[in-house]
């Protein structure tokens, strides 16, 4: 005979009590670690990445890996905050995908600082106003974020992590029906990501680019003839009714964010290294520049070119490779590249998001 609902609930209550005791024990050990470290950084990206990967490998279900990583991410965030609360800058205002990315990466137990521009996020980190910053760097549909790439070229900050955020675009408005919508506000990237949907459903509405999706939601909240494309979070935050969900043209639309800090990161065992390089404008120069990667069996995962702004038709190249810059093969490849490049900047090595390194 199946157990009664009351008995099953009693079992859940008993398990919750055990989980609570274990969480308290974990928190006490985290405090002990903090005392041993004696003021050393409370956030170690490589260690947290190792914990999440190990638990993912041990997981036998029924909880999916994404849910397990979210739960343990919040546990680590809360335990970390017992030592000190991290300050993290992001492209604001509240309700942006940048804020969502920051909370996904660091957990909810942080102090967030909304910034008016990507430039301000960099400045917050560079001046030690905040310990960390989160900036968008590329979108799977619309490509690179040019301002972030330009600032990476000159910043003294390092890259200490990456975040892959699935972007689910929503249409929101106080209009009673779509035919009443005269204009649609959103960030230029989001407008581009939804252009086919807009052409099919709101062909007559003016499309107006604003600094962020949260700003778009604010404008839609104040104008019943306007709509915004933004996240479900922004719709809730600014009290704008949702009219349509998942309107992005590409169902797997994802934005990659970088985490900035002033510290370098130790190897986690599953890492990426990001570089900026340039070379002479002669035939075969790029092939020669990147040949050390193949010779040292280091895989290239991203190559992006951008005008150098130092002269006509001069370019710099943004490169992501597998491995940590302390790995012998990577270190040798970087040494050889530096000998060939006219300019080279190592942005940092950091834990790679699971499934973003080839063959993993």
Image (cartoon, grey):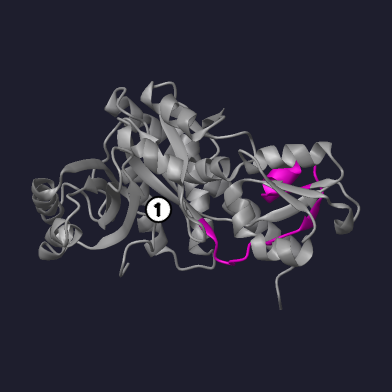
Is 158 displayed left or right of 69 in the figure?
left
> Which residue is more in the foreground, 161 or 346?
346
Is 336 displayed left or right of 158 in the figure?
left
* Circle 1 residue: 52
Q: Quadrant of residue 38?
A: top left
Q: Quadrant of residue 62?
A: bottom right
Q: Which residue lies furthest to the right in this view?
A: 176
Q: Is residue 86 visible?
A: no
**Helix, strand or loop at mark 1:** helix
> Which residue is more in the foreground, 181 or 78?
181
> Which residue is more in the foreground, 156 or 47?
156
Q: Would you place residue 60 above or below residue 245 in this image?
A: below
User: How many residues crowd around disc 1 within 10 Å: few (fewer than 14), some, or many (20 or more)?
Assistant: some
Q: Which residue lies furthest to the bottom in this view?
A: 1
Pinpoint residue 151: horizontal percent, then vertical percent: 38, 36
Q: Residue furthest front?
A: 312
Q: Is residue 211 visible?
A: yes
Pinpoint residue 50: horizontal percent, then vertical percent: 33, 51
Residue drawn at x 62%, y 45% is: 187
Magenta-highlighted residues: 227-254
Residue drawn at x 67%, y 46% is: 186
Pinpoint residue 202: horizontal percent, then vertical percent: 78, 60
Q: Quadrant of the C terminus?
A: bottom left
Pinpoint residue 158: horizontal percent, then vertical percent: 31, 36
């Amino acid at each position: 005979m199946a157990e009664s609902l009351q008995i099953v609930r009693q079992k859940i209550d008993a398990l919750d009590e055990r989980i609570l005791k274990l969480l308290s024990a974990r928190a006490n050990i985290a405090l002990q670690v903090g005392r041993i470290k004696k003021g050393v950084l409370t956030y170690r990206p490589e260690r947290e990445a190792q914990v999440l990967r190990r638990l993912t490998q041990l997981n036998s279900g029924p909880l999916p890996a994404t849910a397990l990583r979210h739960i343990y991410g919040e546990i680590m965030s809360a335990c970390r905050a017992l030592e000190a609360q991290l300050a993290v800058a992001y492209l604001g205002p509240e309700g942006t995908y940048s804020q969502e990315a920051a909370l996904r990466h660091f957990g909810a137990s942080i102090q967030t600082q909304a910034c008016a521009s990507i430039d301000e996020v960099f400045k917050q980190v560079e001046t030690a106003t905040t310990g960390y910053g989160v900036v968008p760097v590329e979108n799977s549909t619309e490509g690179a974020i040019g301002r972030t790439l330009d600032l990476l070229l000159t910043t003294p900050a390092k890259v200490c992590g990456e975040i892959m955020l699935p972007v689910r675009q929503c249409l929101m408005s106080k209009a009673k029906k779509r035919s009443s919508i005269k204009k649609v506000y959103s960030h230029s990237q989001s407008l581009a990501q939804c252009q086919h949907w807009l052409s099919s459903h709101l062909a007559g509405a003016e499309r107006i680019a604003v600094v962020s999706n949260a700003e778009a939601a604010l404008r839609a909240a104040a104008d019943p003839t306007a709509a915004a494309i933004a996240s479900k979070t922004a719709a809730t935050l600014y009290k704008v009714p949702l009219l349509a969900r998942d309107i992005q043209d590409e169902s797997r639309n994802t934005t990659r964010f970088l985490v900035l800090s002033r510290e370098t990161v130790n190897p986690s065992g599953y890492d990426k290294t990001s570089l900026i390089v340039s070379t002479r404008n002669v035939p075969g120069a790029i092939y020669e520049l990147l040949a050390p990667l193949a010779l040292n069996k280091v895989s290239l995962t991203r190559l992006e070119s951008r005008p150098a702004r130092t002269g006509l038709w001069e370019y710099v190249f943004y490169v992501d490779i597998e491995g940590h810059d302390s790995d012998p093969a990577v270190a040798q490849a970087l040494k050889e590249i530096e000998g060939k490049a006219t300019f080279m900047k190592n942005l940092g090595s950091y834990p790679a998001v699971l499934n973003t390194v080839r063959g993993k």
